[in-house]
Image (tube, coloured by chain):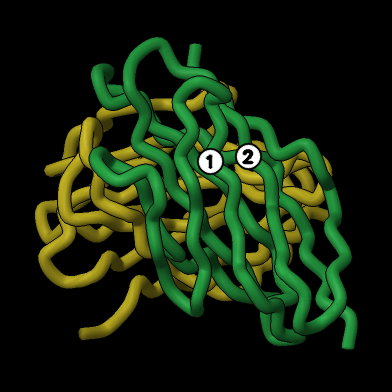
Amino acid sequence: KAGVTQTPRYLIKTRGQQVTLSCSPISGHRSVSWYQQTPGQGLQFLFEYFSETQRNKGNFPGRFSGRQFSNSRSEMNVSTLELGDSALYLCASSLEGASSYNEQFFGPGTRLTVL
Amino acid sequence: AQSVAQPEDQVNVAEGNPLTVKCTYSVSGNPYLFWYVQYPNRGLQFLLKYITGDNLVKGSYGFEAEFNKSQTSFHLKKPSALVSDSALYFCAVRDMRRDDKIIFGKGTRLHILP
């Protein structure tokens, strides 16, 4: 069974631009979560989608948004990029949504650099 | 609000020695607890989890963790460390009662010295 895939793997943007990252979960998984990982802040939760609905949201500004499609694939968008948005963005999928004890399966991440 | 703390940024252990990576948590209800490992330039990989039942949980690669409710801890352990265990380890908690997100600790970098 194929794992979680994320595209692109690397991305370089300039301040003020916007970016869209894509995540394809493991087949059969309906929950997709997004995380931002930086050396200083560790792993911070962005949002979680389950069956095309946003179930939970972290403490990030409205420039960060996401969506999930009927095939469970998910995208996240960051508008008006700032230098501080440079990070590794991780996507994770699991069988069920919030309130689940199922573990998450992570993709390799998208490394975003904002110049 | 739920939270998780990993008090050590880095742990150094000689190969062959036992290792412990510490984790404490805070939730209003009962917790689901997880350990993940991250190797360089990779996403996180699941190691083990505690849901209910036996306090000692066994996971991948010879790792185990002990749930201690009175101390609100879930320390990761391995009897004999390998150089290949060197990685970044994350503890995570989810409140069992609440429809809430999973919270990760800041991570502990484990160095196994040959």
User: Considering only order in the chain, which callout, 1 or 2, is on the residue closer to the N terminus?
Assistant: 2
Numbered disc 1: what chain? B
| Disc number placed over residue B91 in the picture, else none | none
Residue A6's quadrant in the figure?
bottom left
Numbered disc 2: what chain? B
| Element class at badge 2 | loop
Residue lying at 74% horizontally and 53% vertically, measured from the top left = B108
Crowdedness near tag 1: few (<14), some (14–19) or many (≥20) residues, C-alpha within 10 Å? many
Question: Mark 1 sits on what residue?
Answer: B74
- Residue A51 x %, y %: 12, 43
- Residue A83 x %, y %: 82, 44
Is residue A17 positioned above or below A63 on the image? below
**Horizontal arrangement in the rendering, residue A100 relative to residue A63 (left or right):** left
Q: CA distance from mark 2 to mark 1?
A: 5 Å
Q: Is residue A49 visible?
A: yes
Question: Mark 2 sits on what residue?
Answer: B23
Q: Is residue A16 visible?
A: no
**Horizontal arrangement in the rendering, residue B12 relative to residue A24 (left or right):** right
Residue lying at 37% horizontally and 43% vertically, measured from the top left = B55
